[in-house]
Image: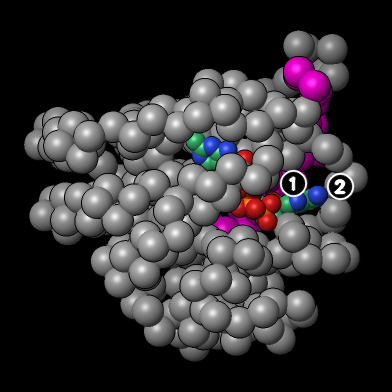
Amino acid sequence: MKKVLTIAGSDSSGGAGIQADIKTFSAHLVYGMSVITSVTAQNTKGVLAAFDLPKEFIEMQIRAIYEDIDVDAVKIGMLSSSEIIKTVAKALTYYNAKNIVLDPVMVSKSGFKLLKDEAISTLVEDLIPICTIITPNIDEASLMAGIKIKNIEDVERACQRIYEFGAENVLIKGGHLDGEPIDVLYDGKDFTYFKGKRIISKNTHGTGCTLSSAIACNLALSYSIVDAVKRSKEYIQGAIENSFSIGYGVGPIDHFFRFRLNKNDE
Ligand SMILES: Nc1ncnc2c1ncn2[C@@H]1O[C@H](COP(=O)(O)OP(=O)(O)OP(=O)(O)O)[C@@H](O)[C@H]1O
Ligand SMILES: Cc1ncc(COP(=O)(O)O)c(N)n1
């Protein structure tokens, strides 16, 4: 059984963060584990508040796992401060962690800041260099690369700029650009394009968390980077196609669409 870890924030409403990650792990039939960095009070309408765990306790959770269990891949999501980023980077380096997938979460869909502005440089300097792949959306890539992204040529330039920060691979997600959602992967040599079909749905809570978790699962399952992204893109497409409404705001996607025998299995 492959073992995959998420280091991220908790979303009380279950659509994003740790909860989305663990659901994705289960849907990929791998064994899921978690290190919680922050607890958010959140629902489909937005984030009410976030409470960061002390860095010593985050470090202790990482230690508890790596000193006992052989981790096949790790996905990193919400890390809200420079202090937490440095703690996670140091611990993962110490334990020689492999297959590190970084989703550089900065702002929730509802507009709540999940990463302090001053911590972006720490993310770039301390964490990106140890990552197997980093998966920014258009806004996150723009901020890190210092490029206003309006089209696919801008995406390619941003990939190259972020690659220079030291990640082995960069995947910029095109969900927030007009037209069909194209994600662009750069490995320092070649670009690979993953084209999706845009689904008109208001229920897209946790799409970024889910994609990065699926990539971590597929790397743990020994797929190459290109195949891991391809399979994860197919998975997120199906999960969004089967998204559904709960509450009054942005609802979740269906992590388990492949397991439902028919539409009425709810
Ligand atoms: N409406 C859509 N239809 C199809 N695919 C989509 C849609 N929106 C996003 N995607 C895909 O979902 C994945 C996540 O992309 P997105 O750009 O939404 O990330 P994100 O902004 O980090 O997500 P989040 O807001 O959950 O953090 C990408 O593979 C993207 O192409
Ligand atoms: C704990 C946590 N992590 C990540 C997100 C980003 O997800 P989204 O952009 O869909 O709100 C979130 N809302 N909450």
Secondary element at tag 1: helix
The answer to whether one can see residue 20 in this image is no
Above or below, 143 against 69 in this view is below
Any atom of ligand 1 within 8 Å of the CB at mark 2? yes
Foreground pick, 222 / 232: 232
Residue 186 lies, in percent from the top left, at 53, 78
Q: Is mark 1 within 8 Å of ligand 1?
A: yes
> Which residue matches tag 2?
199
Sooner in the amino-acid sequence: mark 1 or mark 2: 2
Q: Residues within 10 Å of mark 2 (few under 14, many from 20)?
A: some
Q: Are marks 1 and 2 in contact (CB under 8 Å)?
A: yes
Going by the image, does 25 lie left or right of 246? left
Q: Position of residue 240 (x, y in %)?
A: 76, 39
Magenta span of residues: 228-248
- The mark tally for this picture is 2
Quadrant, the C terminus = top right
